[in-house]
Image: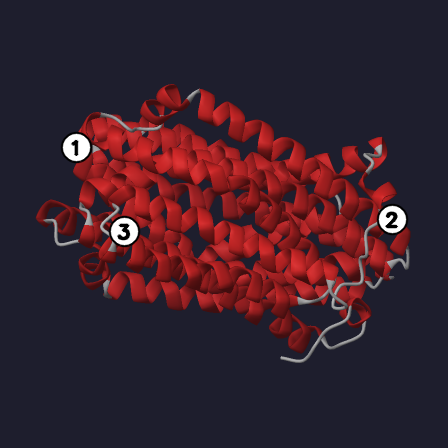
Amino acid sequence: MSKISSSQLGSEPIGSLLIKQAVPASIGILVMSLNIVVDTIFVGQWIGAVAIAAINVVLPVSFFIGALGMAIGIGGSSIISRALGAGDKGKALRTFGNQLSLTLLFSVSFVLMGLYFVDTLVPSFGGKGAIFEPAKVYYKIVLYGVPFLALCMMGNTVIRAEGKPKFAMYAMMIPSVGNLIMDYLFIYILDWGMAGAAWATSISYVLCFGYVLYFFLSKHSELKLKLPHLLLQLSLVREIGALGFVTLARQAVVSIIYLLVNNILFNLGGESSVAVYAIIGRMLMFALFPVLGVTQGFLPIAGYNYGAHHYERVRETINTSIKYASLLATIVFLLIFIFPETIVKVFTSDVIVVENTPNAMRWVFAATPIIALQLIGAAYFQAIGKAIPALLLTLSRQGFFFIPLVLLLPRFYGENGVWISFAIADVLSTIVTGYFLNKEIKKDLVTNFR
């Protein structure tokens, strides 16, 4: 993988360029996902199945605050990619400075509120019964490191917008490897239990922040900030907010889904059902890493070429990305359907969890081969700066379809109704996204190219 400058996003062949962008993104997501999966395995094997459920309860809160950084990062990076494509480096610098200020302001504020309302938030997200105490221990410690996570997520997207995917990959790999080493030390050697798992996670966020800071201070970055760039500019804040709200809304919906599903499953089957969902949640993060990598690689290429008015290259980027991602998603689908029992036994030996997870996992991943269209389609509108359709399409899968389904179907089908809801929501949202993406391509890219 050779070094990519931002200008090469508008000149290199799309196929090879997408590979150069997507492979490092995929590797970074893989390592980060493996970190989460192995962390869950360590906790499950060394502490117990209830500990897995406890971590799953905490995830919505820490993910939401971390997602603030990702939202600000992706919203601003769309602007940066288009600004670099149009040759406006000044706007790119002002945007990055505003991203940094916004991330610090919001992440620290939400962490303070999260710590203040700890005894309310943990039970509301499913931390009840035997899950409450270990969840509270994990929650409080992890929250200290979440502002660093927010800064890392923001910085990582800017690194990609500069056309430096390998550095973005390293930023994801370093804390993941560090977390696994500290998991072994804190949980297995020092026997710190849930506190050990939490400290390993928080320290890993600090490691990530250290590397991202190094990148922007080094010669590798084109964006060298000065103090005036940090001053918030209303027009930029609005644009960052409009585009970033798409990502933030998606993550907020994810947090709501965790809240709903954890509580529904706890009421239907207790702690073991929450543990089943925790394992499936880890597999959703891990197994789809190549598809998410293609989506991450797609964003800066589409944004840069749209800003440079290279509309035929934008169309080619869409088609190539969907083709690559669909192929990878199909491979993931086959592996999940063939080996679900083997996968579950890696996480835990709990008999009830091992018996109930395979069928649930098959339903959750049933529509995987077609989700590439939904992910790339929603990402396209975000890449070109069209916030409202990006928001609506992003929310269609988990918000507009899944939440009503998961509130309704369990009343008729019990726990199976929860798992079936995932597949139906994937199919419906893909159909809707495909329709609007095709309409947008005909209206915008084809017309402009002619």
Name above or below for residue 150 compared with residue 308: above
Between residue 89 and residue 398, name the one nearer to us. Answer: 89
| Sequence-first disc among 3 and 1 | 1
Q: CA distance from mark 3 to mark 1?
A: 16 Å
Q: Which residue is mark 1?
A: 269
Kind of residue at disc 2: Lys
Kind of residue at disc 3: Met
Between residue 207 and residue 330, name the one nearer to us. Answer: 207
Categorize mark 3 by other alpha carbons within 10 Å: few (<14), some (14-19), many (20+).
Answer: many
Q: Which mark is residue 361?
A: 3
Q: CA distance from mark 2 to mark 1?
A: 53 Å
Res 180 quadrant in image: bottom left
| Sequence-first disc among 3 and 2 | 2
Name above or below for residue 293 compared with residue 425: below
Measured as percent of width and height from the top left, residue 400 is found at 50, 32
Q: CA distance from mark 3 to mark 2?
A: 46 Å
Question: In the rendered view, does 370 fall on the left or right side of 72?
Answer: left
Q: What count of labels does the image hold?
A: 3
Measured as percent of width and height from the top left, residue 10 is found at 80, 69
Can you tell which of label 3 and label 2 is closer to the viewer?
2
Kind of residue at disc 1: Gly
Residues under numbered marks 3 and 1 in contact, where contact means CB atoms less than 8 Å apart: no
Where disc 3 sits, the SS reads helix
Where disc 2 sits, the SS reads helix
Residue at the spot 43% in from the left edge and 64% down from the top edge: 177
Measured as percent of width and height from the top left, residue 276 is found at 23, 44
